[in-house]
Image (cartoon, grey):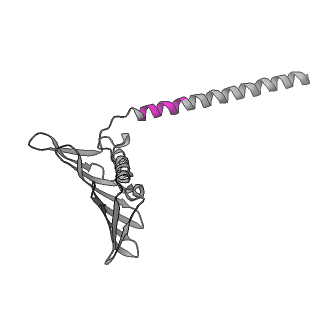
Amino acid sequence: MVNTIKSTSQRINKSTIFTLLCILLLASCTKSSINLEESAYEEKYFDLQKYFEQEVTDIKLKNFQFLKKITLNDRTEEQQFDTLNIEEELNIFIKNNINRPSLIGRYEVDSILNDQQQLNALNYRTLDEKLPVKTLNIQFDEQQKVTQLELKTTNQSRLIDTYSKAIYQPNKGYTINNHQEILLFGAQDMEIEVAYFK
């Protein structure tokens, strides 16, 4: 009798282990399917993340120096750098990439063509006021290379409201303006201006 109970217990344990393995296998298959769907996603909007990943690489290769000016309310400080953590500096653009499956159809797109019917500008405007990225405007030259990007965002909470405008010009630099309204402390303005040079 004891042997029978022990044998039954072993069969149950083996059955339980087999079931768990099957569940884990199905979970891994599902995850793989999701990754395939994401990798197969076609670009619908301008991809800020892809663009700035390439920009970071190019900036490092060109060995730029940087002149950085920070203005906080009425106080300004200026400093020259041989190197900057450029990924961190440009993160405002990367983290606000609107080219995501969940944002399809939530932005109005206006394509502007020049006299030669080439793309001169792309203007995006949110159709959902809850989204942080309000507008994204991109200008192109005749070779279809970006000459300027302008990004406007807002982030609101109970304690602080932040309004930002960031402008990027390839091979020249960028400007980031932040206006914050802080509960009990009032308004605060900050501008970060970085120029590239050799």
Please name the residue shown 71% across and 28% down the image.
16
Residue 13 or 109: which is nearer the viewer? 109
Q: Residue furthest left?
A: 115
Please name the residue shown 54% across and 29% down the image.
29
Q: Locate residue 28: give its quadrant.
A: top right
Q: Locate residue 165: give its quadrant.
A: bottom left
- Quadrant in the picture for the C terminus: bottom left
- Quadrant in the picture for the N terminus: top right
Residue 17 or 172: which is nearer the viewer? 172
Q: Position of residue 46 (x, y in %)?
A: 29, 44
Please name the residue shown 41% across and 34% down the image.
39
Q: Is residue 185 above or below residue 120?
A: below
Q: Is residue 169 above or below residue 111?
A: below
Q: Position of residue 22 (x, y in %)?
A: 63, 26
Side (left or right) of 115 relative to 147: left
Q: Residue furthest bottom?
A: 74
Q: Is residue 17 above or below residue 125?
A: above
Side (left or right) of 102 relative to 147: right
Please name the residue shown 40% across and 62% down the image.
157
Q: Position of residue 5 (x, y in %)?
A: 86, 24
Please say whether residue 110 is one of the residues in the magenta stretch. no
* Range shown magenta: 29-38
Q: Position of residue 79 (x, y in %)?
A: 36, 71
Prevailing secondary structure of the magenta residues = helix
Residue 60 or 19: which is nearer the viewer? 60
Residue 61 or 171: which is nearer the viewer? 61
